[in-house]
Amino acid sequence: MVLLTMIARIPDGLPLAASMQDDEQVGRKLIEYQNQAKLLFKKLNFQSPKQCTIESVPYYFHYLIERDVCYLVLCEKNFSKRSAFSFLEDIAAEFNKLYGRQVSTVSRPYTLIEFDNYIQKAKKNYIDSRVRRNLNSLNNELQDVQRIMVQNIDDVLQRGTVLSELDTKAQNLSILSKKYKKEATNLNLKSMYIKLTVAAVFVILLFLYFYVL
C-alpha cells in the first residue's frame, strides 16, 4: 500500500505537493517519515540516481526524478517495486502536464497541493488494479486446481474401467477353471471305467483259458 506521496523540486528541495493516508492515526505515525522525506529532498541533486529505493524500517521509500522534480512514495514492504515506480511514472506524467511550466516559479511549500486529488485517484486505481490482478491470479489458480481435479477424476474413472475389466476377466477365468475341473473329473472317471473294463475282460479271458480250454 502507498502510505505517503510527496513531490519536491530538486534544486532547493521545496515540497510542491503531498498526499497522506486519510486515517488520522496512521497520518500521525507518518509525520516522522514525512520529515525524513524532506531531509532526503534537500540531499538530492542533479547527480543523484534517477530511480532509487531506500529502506526506512518497516517501510520503503521509492523515488523517481524527472525534469528537476522528485516524485516520492512511502510503501509497505509487500508493495512491489514495479507497481511503485509505475505509480510514480503515472503521477509524474500528469504533474508535468498540469504544472510543468509553474515548477520553477513556485516560491511557497505545497503551492500545488490540489494535485492531491489526482494522487488519490491514481492510488485508488492502482489499488483496484492490484485487487483485480490478485482476483485474476486466484481465479487462474482455482481453474488450475479444477483442471487437476477433473484430470484426477478422469484417472480414477479410467482406473475404475480397468478394474471392472479385470474383474470380468477374473470371473471368466473362474468359470473356465470350474469347467476345466469338471471336464477333468469326467475324463478321470471315463479313464477309470475303461481300465476296469479292460481288467474285467482280461480276467474273463484268463478264466476261459485255464478252465474251459
Image: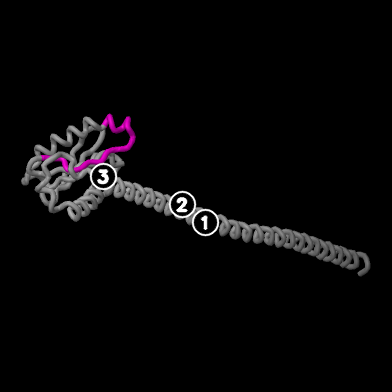
Q: Calculate the distance from the C-alpha at mark 1 to the C-alpha at mark 3.
A: 50 Å
Is residue 81 positioned above or below 167 on the image? above
Q: Nearer the viewer, mark 1 or mark 2?
A: 2
Residue extending farthest right: 212
**CB within 8 Å, label 1 to label 2:** no
Residue 212 falls left or right of residue 67? right
- Considering depth in this image, is 75 or 177 the residue closer to the camera? 75
The image quarter containing residue 172 is: bottom right
The N terminus - image quarter: top left
- Asked whether disc 1 touches disc 3, contact meaning CB atoms under 8 Å apart, the reply is no
The residue pinned by badge 3 equals 116
| Magenta span | 13-29
Give the label, 1 or 3, closer to the camera: 3
* Label annotation for residue 142: 2
Which element type, helix, strand or loop, lies under badge 3? helix
| Spatial separation of the CA atoms under disc 1 and disc 2 | 12 Å
Question: Mark 2 is on which residue type?
Answer: Leu
Quarter of the image with the C terminus is: bottom right
Answer left or right for 34 relative to 10: right
Cβ atoms at labels 3 and 2 below 8 Å apart: no
**Looking at the image, is 100 positioned above or below residue 44?**
below
